[in-house]
Amino acid sequence: MDSKRVVELVVISDVHLGTSGCQAAELLKYLKTIKPKTLILNGDIVDIWQFKKRYFPKSHLKVIKHLIGLASDRCPVYYITGNHDEMFRRFTGMKIGKLRIVNDLKLILGGKTVWFFHGDVFDVVMQYSKWLSKLGAIGYDSLIWLNTLVNSVARFLGFEPVSFSKKIKESVKGAVKFINAYEDTVADIAARKDIQTVVCGHIHKPEMRTIEVEGKTVNYLNSGDWIENLTSLEYNEGVWRIFNYRKDFIEQPDSTDGDQENMVDVKVKDLFNNMLVDFHN
């Protein structure tokens, strides 16, 4: 008997496969316990900015294989391009099996339009100082690597893990101001388009809140990331929720693995293989 949890729609973003901070093993465990009817990969799934031949662990490859398997198993998978995987934009509009690559996506859920996009187009730093963004990404990854090392020692000594970058974001006024401005900008654009719900990623901050814009109410949702927060968005029967791996994950027996990794459609596999070749060039 399949004990996987059926979910109408799942949104995952900012996995950053190919970096040391990516929590690929935890993501794979989560994916193996759910059966999404639709899966949206909302940008920065593979980190091409920092991609290196010498660092792409098996756990990261298993995530890619599992995602391809889902697309081969009659589950629509939308890959929305982000800034760290912007190379995929050359494949925008491509459809192979149930896999589609898009820059953004609009779906009707509960009779209302929901707009999905990564969100980097609303990031002023990203748009006008790309080199600065890349430099920041390298520094962020280095901080995550150091954080992982420190937390390994902390766990051995019996202490609770901490997140350096999360503490910095929460304590630095400029970072808090940037996040608030980003969320307000996204909501403002949605209101102008008469869209009630926006779902994005990019800033690694899981969030669900309503924002008032000139008499209009916009539901702002952010799926977070799989580096620090380990979160996704799930939609069922008209209700959204943030799934938090550390709080909500329940370990399942091995029998629930589902063998998605063994159901990879050849055409979809070839597409991803071609993309990975591009990474190496």
Image (spheres, rainbow, N blue to C red):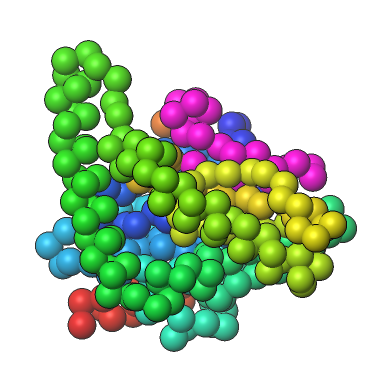
Taking depth in this image into account, of 126 and 13 the one nearest to the observer is 126
Figure disc tally? 0
Q: Is residue 34 above or below residue 190?
A: above
Please name the residue shown 16% across and 67% down the image.
53
Residue 111 vs residue 93: left or right?
Answer: right
| Residue 41 x %, y % | 52, 60
Classify 239 as above or below 103: above
Q: Is residue 255 left or right of residue 134?
A: right
Examine the rendering and report whether any part of residue 99 can be seen: no
Residue at (33%, 75%) from the top-left corner?
A: 130
Q: Residue extending furthest top?
A: 158
- On the image, the x and y values in percent for residue 5 come to 61, 36
Q: Within the magenta stretch, is there residue 245?
A: yes
- Quadrant showing the N terminus: top right
Residue at 27% from the left image edge and 75% from the top image edge: 131
Instruction: Check the image and name the residue furthest to the bottom.
Output: 90
Does the magenta-highlighted stretch encompass residue 93?
no
Query: In the rendered image of this protein, does residue 76 appear above or below residue 34?
Result: below
Quadrant of the image occupied by residue 182: bottom right
**Picture quarter with the C terminus:** bottom left
Taking depth in this image into account, of 66 and 266 the one nearest to the observer is 66
Residue 104: x and y, percent?
A: 60, 72
**Is residue 119 among the parts visible in the rendering?**
yes
Please identify the residue farthest to the right as the structure is shown: 111
Give the quarter of the image for residue 276.
Answer: bottom left
- Where does residue 64 sit, x and y in percent of width and height? 38, 59
Q: Residue at x 55, y 76 (%)?
A: 103
Pick the residue in front: 253 or 228: 228
Magenta highlight range: 231-252
